[in-house]
Image (cartoon, rainbow, N blue to C red):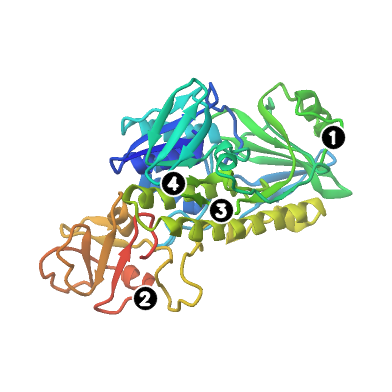
Amino acid sequence: MRVLVVGGGPTGLTLGIELARRGVAVRVVDKATAYFDGSRGDALQPRTLEVFDDLGVLDAVRAAGAPPAPLRVHLDGRFAGEHWMTEPRGPRPDVPYPNGWVLGQSQTEAILRDRLEEFGVRVEPGTELSGLAQDADGVTARFATGEQARFDYLVGADGGASLVRKEIGVAFPGATDETFRVLVGDVSVPGLDLSVGHWFAAAGNPVRGVALTPLPGTGRFQFISPPLGEGDDASLETMQAVLDRFSAGLRLTGHGWSTVWRPNVRLAERYRVGRVFLAGDAAHVHPPTGGQGLNTGVQDAYNLGWKLAGETALDSYETERRAVAARVLGVSTDLLDKYAAGSADAHKRGEEGFGLDITYRAADATGPLVAGDRAPDAPLLDADGKRVRLFDLFRGPHFTRLAFGAPAPDEEHAHAVLRPGERPVGGRYVVDAEGHAFAAYAAAPGDTFLVRPDGYLA
């Protein structure tokens, strides 16, 4: 099988890894001649960290990034206390990564590119798709260089302006608000503490101000302005002028990536036409509030990868992921509306954006844990008494079968989950010494669960 992934951002890279580790011949191309350098999507949510655990990049992500920092609030230039956008949570047996993680998008992409190269696949920059044609047997891709190449499937992970989406005639309904403009960029601020974030506002309107949040490993902050005037641009001078309104007394000495962002909320009417699929921003674009865009795209790719590699359940990709995108768009748009209205709630985050409650269960499905639900983690002991986790058993491109209190079936990646003192009867087994696995799965002796490669129950 040959697959073309158009777009070398987080979505395309994740899909490339998913396919390559299953032995699929995959090309990942991007029309940009240089890799993106900037923070953009710098918030990694807990479910994305679980995906990165499975992909083998979590250690690198955690080494390069940092947990979210509190915001030090400055009103009229005076310190007024600290504020957490999301209160830190402790790990649980079923949720090992309960908090988000901060890492600039370009750094995340570099880690994913390195992982992809471990499978012998390199992103091809400066390789622009100019058109495509498909038939019952495959897809012919045309490139701006004049090259034509044949693939079994093609995936458009080429952003909100996706050429792939246009080529297959998929509508992208939604709205762009040209009247609401926010400046986002990466800045250097000498003398400002990089271990925490900073909020600068006027005492008379404390919820409308400038946020400077640290970007680990860069020595910079991400700058987010309040709504701009019509003539404002994405220059360092504009950033400085906006910051000066709040008596911050700080001097910005340099900046990298920056943009004037406008609310653009759209959802593709279809995620698949024949042998062509859409993922990430090509299928849905979000307000930056809630930090959902990159995370939703990575999880699109994680859902699609195993299905595409096995040419199985392909229609379920749109059914499962489009519903998730619609929900996420609602959450991020609600936060944006609160921000635009000057609501204090706009700076608070709950667990609705963590991705841990995503489910693909049927609408009429009942039970504490059923097909379509996320498979929880739990600590265990293996046959040698070594501590392992359920996530260790799931890691990799395979299905995993768990037989609670019963012999494991004679199949690869099947495990009996036993209570202390129970005798194994052949096959692989692990011991639920602390009872967390039985509790997380609400399992009775004899219950069997099949876990999909993307960590959801089959």
Q: Which residue is mark 4?
A: 275
Q: Disc 2 to disc 3, how far (Cα)?
A: 36 Å
- Badge 3: residue crowd in 10 Å (few <14, some 14–19, many ≥20): some
Query: Tag 3, which secondary structure?
Result: loop
**Residue at point 31%, 30% (across, down):** 120
Q: Disc 4 to disc 2, how far (Cα)?
A: 39 Å
Residue kind at label 4, given as amino acid type:
Arg
**Residue at point 28%, 40% (across, down):** 23
* Residue 270, numbered circle: 3
Q: Disc 1 to disc 4, how far (Cα)?
A: 56 Å
Give above or below for 142 relative to 158.
above
Q: In the image, which is nearer the foreground, mark 2 or mark 1?
A: 2
Q: Camera-side residue: 65 or 226?
A: 226
Query: Tag 2, which secondary structure?
Result: loop
* Residue 442, numbered circle: 2
Q: Which residue is mark 1?
A: 247
Q: Camera-side residue: 19 or 101?
A: 19
Q: Disc 3 to disc 1, how far (Cα)?
A: 48 Å
Query: Tag 4, which secondary structure?
Result: loop
Q: Earlier in the sequence, mark 3 or mark 4?
A: 3
